[in-house]
Image (cartoon, rainbow, N blue to C red):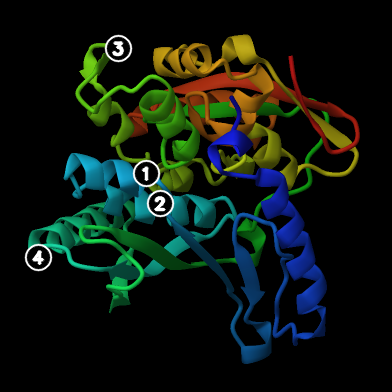
Amino acid sequence: MDYKASGVDIDKGNRFAKKIKELVGVLPKNGTISSIGGFGALVDLDGLGCNLILSSSTDGVGTKLLVAQHANKHDTVGIDLVAMNVNDIIATGTEPYFFLDYISYSDVEDKVLEDIAKGIVDGLELSECSLVGGETAQMADVYKKGEYDLAGFCVGVGKKEDILPKPLKEGMVLIGFESSGFHSNGYSLLRKVFFDIHHLDLYSEFCGKPLAEILLKPTTIYVKLSKSIKPYAKALIHITGGGFCDNVPRVLNSDIDAILEKDKLPEVDIFKVVQDMGNVEENEMFRTFNMGIGMIAICENRDKEKIIEASKYSGIKSYEIGFLIKGRGELKIV
C-alpha cells in the first residue's frame, strides 16, 4: 500500500506546481521575493514605503474532514485548519497576523457550523492571530447531506532580517519538535488502511484509545514556540504534506545535505501500526507522515541547548534528529 494507491499522487501535485511556476512568469511581481513552492509567499513592502515583509498561506484540512463527519465530531478540525496555515507562516520567519476562513457545505446542522467556528477560534487563540473575515457557501448540488469542506487563508508580517531560511552550512543540527499525531496529512492512506482494508470502525481501540480519538487529535500549533527560538533558528521546516522527503529539501542550499537519523525520532506506536497493517514501505511512511515530528528547527550546534530549553518551557518535547553536511540539497535518511 502507498499514498498513490489510496488516491493521492504527490508527484502529480509537484508537476502541477512546476507548471504553475511557468504560467505565472507573465504576471507582475509587485515586490514578490519568494517563488512558488515555499512554505509561504513573501512580499516586500519597500515599494510602498514600508520596511516590512508580508507572508501568506492557504490550506485546508483534507480528508480528515471525512473522519470528523463520520464521527460527528467537528470541534477540532477548525484547529487543524488554523494550524496548517500558521505553521507554514512561521516557517518563513514571519508571524501570523490575521486569518480568513471559507466553509462550503450542503445540508448541515447549525451546531456543526458552530463547532467548526469554535475550533477556528481556539486555534487562532493559540496562534495569537485575529479572524478578520470569511465566507460560507451552501452548495447542495456539490456536497451530500452532512458534508462540508474548509479552507483557510493567513497573512503574516515580519522584518527582512528575520526571514527564513538563512544560509545553512555544514555542522548545523536539526532539532525536531513532537507532533500530536498524524496532524492533517496522510488521511486518504489512513482511511484506506483502517476502514477499507481492515474494516475497522472509529471505536476500535489502538494504543489504549479509540481510533476516532487518535485520528481526530488536532494538529499542534508551533507559533508561540517559534517566537521563543527566533534568535537561534536558521530555518524552520513544517513537516506537512510530503512528509520529510518533500519538506526538508525546501530549505536546503544547493551545496548542503540534511542527514536525518531515524533512530533518534520519538517512538510513536501508531505510525508503526499503520506501517504494519498497510504493509507500507519505510520510504513511503517518511514521504507521507510526520513520524512524530511536526516541525524542525535548524540551528548552530552551539545554540541547540537554547532551543531545547525553549521547547521545554513551551511544553513541546524536542529531539536532536540530524545534522547538515556538504552535498547537493538533498535529504538522506539513515
Q: Nearer the viewer, residue 166 or 242?
A: 242
Query: Which quadrant would residue 221 be assigned to in this image?
Result: top left
Mark 4 or mark 3: name the one nearer the start of the chain.
Answer: 4
Horizontally, is 42 left or right of 24 in the view?
A: left
Q: Earlier in the sequence, mark 1 or mark 3?
A: 1
329 up-or-down from 22: above or below: above
Q: Quick one: label 1 or label 4, which is nearer the N terminus?
A: 1
Give how far apart the Cα atoms at labels 2 and 1 are. Answer: 6 Å
Residue appearing at x 43%, y 23% in the figure: 197
Q: Determine which residue is flagged by label 2.
A: 61
Q: CA distance from mark 1 to mark 3?
A: 20 Å
Residue that extends furthest to the bottom in the rendered view of this protein: 48
Residue 253 spot, x, y in % from top left: 83, 44
* Real-space Cα separation, disc 2 to disc 3, in angstroms: 24 Å
Q: CA distance from mark 4 to mark 2?
A: 20 Å
For badge 2, the amino acid type reads: Val
Q: Position of residue 129 (x, y in %)?
A: 33, 63
Q: Secondary structure at mark 2?
A: loop
Residue 207: give its label: 3
Secondary structure beneath disc 4?
A: helix
Check residue 110 in the rendering and tell me which mark sits there, or answer none. 4
Q: Residues within 10 Å of mark 4 (few under 14, many from 20)?
A: few
Residue 267 shows which numbered tag? none
Q: Secondary structure at mark 3?
A: loop
**Left or right, residue 275 beside residue 51:** left
Residue tagged by mark 1? 64
> Disc 1 vs disc 3: which is toward the camera?
1
Q: Residue at x 31, y 76 (%)?
A: 134
Q: Are marks 2 and 1 in contact (CB under 8 Å)?
A: yes
* Residue 297 makes an appearance in the image: no
Q: Evaluate if marks 1 and 3 touch, with contact meaning CB atoms under 8 Å apart.
A: no
Considering the numbered disc 1 on the image, is that residue within a helix, a strand or a loop? helix
